Amino acid sequence: MTRTAWSVMMLGAGLAAWRLQVEAAVPAEGRPPRPRNVVVILADDVGWGDLSCFGATAVQTPQVDRLAREGARFTDAHASAATCTPTRYAMLTGEYAWRKQGTGIATGDAALLIEPGRTTLAAVFQRAGYVTGVVGKWHLGLGPGPGLTDWNKEVVPGPREIGFDYSFLIPATGDRTPCVYLENQRVVGLDPDDPIQVSFKLKEENYPGELDGRRDRAQLKMDWDYGHHFAVVNGIGRIGYMAGGKRARWVDEEMADTLAAKGAAFIARNKDKPFFLYFATHDIHVPRVPHPRFVGKTSMGPRGDAIVQFDFQVGAILDALDAHGLAEDTLVILSSDNGPVLNDGYKDQAVEKLGSHRPAGPYRGHKYSAYEGGTRVPFLVRWPKRIKGGTQSAALVSLVDLVATSAALCGQSLAYGDAPDSMDLSAALLDPGTAGRASFIAEGARMSVRDGVWKFIPANARKDGPKRPDTGRLGDPDAFVKGEQDTGSWNVDQLYNTAEDPREAHNLAGTQPERVAAMRAMLQKARTAGRTRP
């Protein structure tokens, strides 16, 4: 089925596309710059160079390119971390995740990481009168935590307790149990006579009769390379064990269609009210198992085909806005939760079929990394009523800024304790010629700080983020091809001019001791002060 046919089926035939009109980024006299609707599309593991509007040629992403053509493309935008859970935590709370213990990559049975009642991105919109919804990958914990969460009942606390009126979730990631969807915090399609059990501590013998990724490896339809050898769901090994819930388990090949349909349905259901939709795709995170209609669309195997599938989902959301005449006054923001990774635990030929494609573009590093490729991500903003199309911005922006920026756009005030690291970048979003934030701190295999174009990675820094020992195994394209070691200089201070040296190949720390000292003090102040927002 083509994307167009799918959209017609889901949204109804006979609706003409809404003609977009681009006007200047200055609000009408006396009118606050408040969008009628807001949609945040967050990709998973999509790198700066993975989209054709950012230079990719081995894969084409026409729907994402449409956003760039009709809005603004930001070239120095960053996830707040080089991995998913901390980025999502920071984006929703406006607080760097490294400030809170336990915000590394969450297990599938982790407790909700965000305190109920806290001011979040969703709560800001909710207070401003928007209907709020989240569809897709969650990975921020649900319920009371390991051994306490009962997946056979309503799972509380969850998205509702932090500001979302509606939720349809992948609880963690596609490679972690439980492999079921939750709608409004209840497992979809659960048979009460086949209760779900989930554990990341118990062993195989605690789940008799279930397939196991090591013992039953010959039966897998996608083999694992490392880590994904416990529960088997849909012929794929996962992280963690799971028993029961057979009727409720997802089919990976149908996941993109399921999420796109739920996102489009939320828009249709709330077309007559202001709404905020956080649409978090699972593509292109592992396991990469695209629907058969996307298989073979690129020369890069499942990873490349999953990028095409991601683009389809973006198109489904844009089509829904068009179908209901909402596009002109809807702010759409698209980004990714961290940089790219090739081999992330499955044998899907992501490295072997890479060819000349560079997922991180010109930047060094990848998911998990302290270098630019770990956090520099695509960032597109479209709001036809306010933002001139086809523009580009070099403003320094971070996903942690969405809370303060959204509050400003919606006329909501933040208390002193709210969103302690989020900056109001509404001016930079509305006018691509406006400067962004002056500096920010990134969380990867090591902490780092950007101050303008300068990047500082201190020696022997706290290793707050998750690590992987072998960049060749991970498949950083340049490390894999050239043998470059991403982690080879952890014992020395590193200073780079990211504008002149995007590959971070020339360490200038030894020649600029005063700048090193100033940036070290900046990082220390941010840690001890507990906040960076004025």
Image (tube, rainbow, N blue to C red):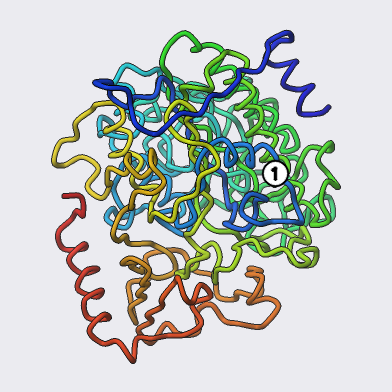
Q: Position of residue 501 (x, y in %)?
A: 49, 77
Q: Nearer the viewer, residue 31 or 130?
A: 31
At horizontal 69% and vertical 56% (from top left) the residue drawn is: 56
Q: Is residue 504 left or right of residue 233?
A: left
Which residue, given by chain and number where applicable, does mark 1 sit on? Answer: 61
Instruction: Give how far across and how far down residue 385 sits, in percent.
Output: 45, 25
> Taking 260 as reference, is 324 above or below it?
above
Residue 164 appearing in the image: yes
The answer to which of 10 and 226 lies nearer the viewer is 10
Q: Nearer the viewer, residue 137 or 409?
A: 409
Give the number of marks. 1
Q: Residue at x 66, y 27 (%)?
A: 316
Q: Quadrant of residue 494?
A: bottom left
Q: Nearer the viewer, residue 95 or 335?
A: 335
Left or right, residue 232 beside residue 102? right
Name the residue rendered at 50%, 34% in the picture: 382
Q: Is residue 195 above or below residue 282?
A: above
Image location of residue 28, percent across then percent down: 32, 23
Residue that lies at the very extreme toward the bottom in this rendered image:
510
Is the residue marked by circle 1 packed among few (<14), some (14-19), or many (20+) residues within 10 Å?
many
Q: Residue at x 41, y 19 (%)?
A: 36
Is residue 282 shown above or below 205? above
x and y percentages locating residue 509 in the rendered image: 34, 86
Residue 190 in sight in this render = no
Q: Amino acid at mark 1?
A: Thr
Q: Secondary structure at mark 1?
A: loop
Quadrant location of the N terminus?
top right
Q: Quadrant of residue 364?
A: bottom right
